[in-house]
């Protein structure tokens, strides 16, 4: 099974109202912004979507809303991960219809060794026929998936790609160098997406593209086409706001920019907390500059 998730993917935020119920009108506007802005595929219920704070029923309703607006225009990847292998496998066996792939984070908190990570994903791959994107983010999980682990898992037919957010360029390039044909490498760090594509990556699952899909997709598509003059220009235009978005935690920063664009409000569920007023003003200024 070859990877079909390439280009500019977006890890959708979940908009909330001031009473912290889901803002479905804001979500509809966000999905339409992605469709119009050049995004290639949507990721629903990743960490950026505050998935740990949503109930099962809420997650289902968010997915249904995204599907209703999308109408099959963009591929949809659904986040299903955890550190209880049996429970995650059971979840994969009862997924709603209309999902094109799964994003599944490496088990967090209990810090398995590499053999445990491999066994975890082998069991997940047996639990679904959908293509699976691995997700390595040591800063959140407390453990790193090595290049050797990724390459071993890449031989499993329905494990089709890796979202790499380790920030370890040597490790990522080793995966790109040794991967089998058809296995994708997606950047999990907005700030290094352009150089990773230059090194052979196939695209990104982005936070920044929530607020600036037009510019981010232009950067990604230019880099994939080999037009690095334009890609570098867009990369450096976006770099300041990219750093701001993660300065006080994700998705607090990007929700400020979405508020500035009149897409949705800044509200998040605890334990996430709003950004400081100083950072908010800087993001407003940078958002205005990028939208000119």
Image: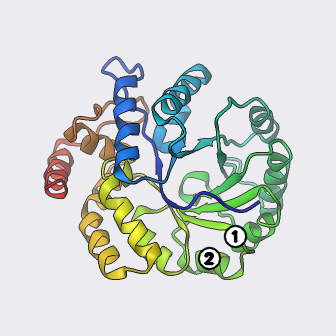
Q: Residues within 10 Å of mark 2 (few under 14, many from 20)?
A: some
In-front residue for pair 2/125: 2
From the viewer's perspective, is residue 63 above or below residue 167?
above
Sequence-wise, the earlier of marks 2 and 1 is 1
Residue on which the image places disc 2: 171
In-front residue for pair 251/204: 204
Identify which residue is drawn at 57% across, 58% down. 137
From the viewer's perspective, is residue 285 above or below residue 55?
below
On the picture, is 235 further left or further right than 225? left
Alpha-carbon distance for marks 2 and 1?
7 Å
Q: Are marks 2 and 1 in contact (CB under 8 Å)?
A: yes
From the viewer's perspective, is residue 141 above or below residue 63?
below
Q: Quadrant of residue 95?
A: top right
Identify which residue is drawn at 30% across, 37% down. 274
On the picture, is 117 further left or further right than 135? right
**Residue 197, percent across and down?**
49, 74
Q: Quadrant of residue 259?
A: top left
Residue on which the image places disc 1: 146
Could you say whether the residue bearing mark 2 is in a helix, strand or loop? helix
In-front residue for pair 88/44: 44
**Residue 46, percent across and down?**
54, 43
Could you say whether the residue bearing mark 1 is in a helix, strand or loop? loop
From the viewer's perspective, is residue 112 above or below residue 179?
above
- Residue 275 in view here: no
Residue 247, numbered label: none
Q: Quadrant of the N terminus?
A: bottom right
């Amino acid at each position: 099974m070859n990877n079909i998730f390439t280009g500019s993917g977006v890890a959708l935020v979940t908009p909330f109202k001031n009473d912290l119920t889901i803002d479905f009108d804001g979500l509809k506007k966000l999905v339409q912004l992605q469709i119009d802005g050049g995004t290639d595929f949507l990721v629903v219920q990743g960490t950026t979507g505050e998935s740990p704070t949503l109930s099962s029923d809420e997650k289902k309703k968010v997915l249904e809303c995204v599907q209703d607006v999308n109408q099959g225009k963009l591929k949809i990847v659904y986040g299903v991960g955890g550190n209880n292998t049996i429970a995650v496998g059971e979840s994969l066996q009862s997924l709603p219809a209309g999902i094109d792939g799964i994003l599944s984070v490496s088990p967090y908190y209990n810090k398995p060794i590499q053999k445990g990570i491999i066994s975890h994903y082998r069991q997940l791959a047996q639990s679904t026929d959908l293509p699976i994107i691995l997700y390595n983010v040591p800063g959140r999980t407390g453990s790193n998936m090595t290049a050797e682990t990724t390459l071993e898992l890449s031989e499993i037919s329905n494990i089709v790609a890796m979202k790499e957010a380790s920030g370890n360029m040597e490790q990522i390039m080793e995966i790109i160098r040794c991967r089998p044909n058809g296995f994708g490498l997606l950047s999990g760090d907005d700030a290094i997406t352009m150089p990773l594509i230059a090194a052979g990556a196939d695209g990104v699952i982005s936070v920044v593209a929530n607020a600036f899909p037009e510019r981010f997709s232009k950067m990604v598509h230019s880099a994939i086409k080999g037009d690095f003059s334009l890609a570098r220009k867009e990369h450096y235009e976006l770099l300041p706001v990219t750093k701001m978005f993660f300065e006080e935690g994700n998705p607090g920063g990007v929700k400020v920019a979405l508020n500035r664009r009149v897409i949705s409000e800044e509200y998040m569920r605890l334990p996430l907390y709003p950004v400081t007023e100083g950072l908010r003003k800087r993001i407003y200024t940078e958002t205005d500059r990028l939208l000119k």
